[in-house]
Amino acid sequence: MTITRRTFLTQHIGCACHIALMAAAMPLAARRAFAAESLGTVVAKEKFGTLEKIADGVWAHVSAPLEGDRTTVSNGGLIAGKDGVLAIEGFQTPEGAKWLAGKAKELTGKWPTHVALTHYHADHANGVAGYLAEAKPPIRATARTRDLVIERNQTPPDPARAAAVKDAIVVSPTGTTTLDLGGRTVKLIPRGGHTDSDVTVELDDPGVVFCGDLVWNRMFPNYVDTVPTKMAASIAGLKRGAGATIYVPGHGPVAKKADIERYQAMFAAVEAAARKAHAKGISAEDAGNTFEMPDSLGMWALFNPAAKTFYQRAFAAWYKELA
Ligand SMILES: [Zn+2]
């Protein structure tokens, strides 16, 4: 796929398309190495990604869309208690959600009893009706996320998705919502900055944070809806001090604190470059075009000229705030 300036300027590019472009930009060897990493114990391996046990009763799905299979595209996961199982994310396709629900049944004996959406982007929400294949678990999302899924996720339109999301149980946009799964309390915490409404799904013990797209690990984030200062505050807010917290990013391998710190350093490097270029009166497009990720920040999944599109979008998001 080639990326022209014209397509950048004229298309609204969602995360799935962002990732397809990223795959096109990434050398095969790097894609393979990227897909092979895992922090937990792999309990299932599919063409589109893995399911890793990261704690007792907690599994992370790490999607591998750079390999070309778009069944899930985003990461997600499962949290099980004595009485219930929460599935996190609706994925790109209903097949993805149905797959994770089937895994819940295999691993815990239960089809998911609850579903949570972290935000409205197609690769996290469009397949959500797949959870309704064998049961009718309630879907939890903020009202804003519910409305955005219905209004904006139209390619393709899907009445089953719209119907499933329309009846979502609303997650508070201001305070923590707790969910008792039986001996295990899950927190749904409203945050923002990647989109208008982001939610993280968190456990205190073991320390696990499902970050949605507030965190990307080793993939350069899509800033399409991003308000960068708000996102930076959300990242700082979800980061925990002591202990061995495991962070499941929206995209890329499962992360630890050091990975979050590297991500924050990358985010800050983009901010610094954007502020400098903005002060000099350089356009976001030109500034993104000439931006080079410092080697000290490690791999951020884009290395050829096509990648500059993502930098341009990041600079454009900063410029909007700096204006
Ligand atoms: Zn997203």
Image: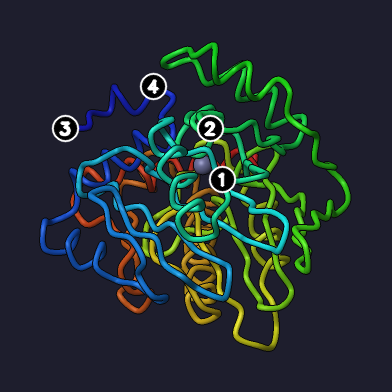
83 relative to 72 in the view: left or right: right
Rendering colour mode:
rainbow
Name the foreground residue: 148 vs 44: 44
Q: Are marks 1 and 4 in contact (CB under 8 Å)?
A: no
Which residue in the structure is indicated by mark 4? 11
Inspect the image, locate mark 4, and give the three-letter code of the amino acid beneath it: Gln
Inspect the image, locate mark 2, and give the three-letter code of the amino acid beneath it: Glu
- Looking at the rendered structure, the secondary structure element under dot 1 is loop
- Residue 82 in percent (x, y) is at 71, 63
Q: Is residue 277 above or below residue 148?
A: below
Which residue in the structure is indicated by mark 3? 2
Inspect the image, locate mark 1, and give the three-letter code of the amino acid beneath it: Trp
User: Which residue is at the far front?
Assistant: 109
Q: Are marks 3 and 4 in contact (CB under 8 Å)?
A: no
- Looking at the rendered structure, the secondary structure element under dot 3 is loop
Which residue in the structure is indicated by mark 1? 111
What residue is at 84 percent from the left and 51 percent from the top? Answer: 177
N-terminal-most mark, 1 or 3: 3
What residue is at 30 percent from the left and 68 percent from the top? Answer: 299
Identify the image quadrant of residue 18: top left
Which residue in the structure is indicated by mark 2? 134
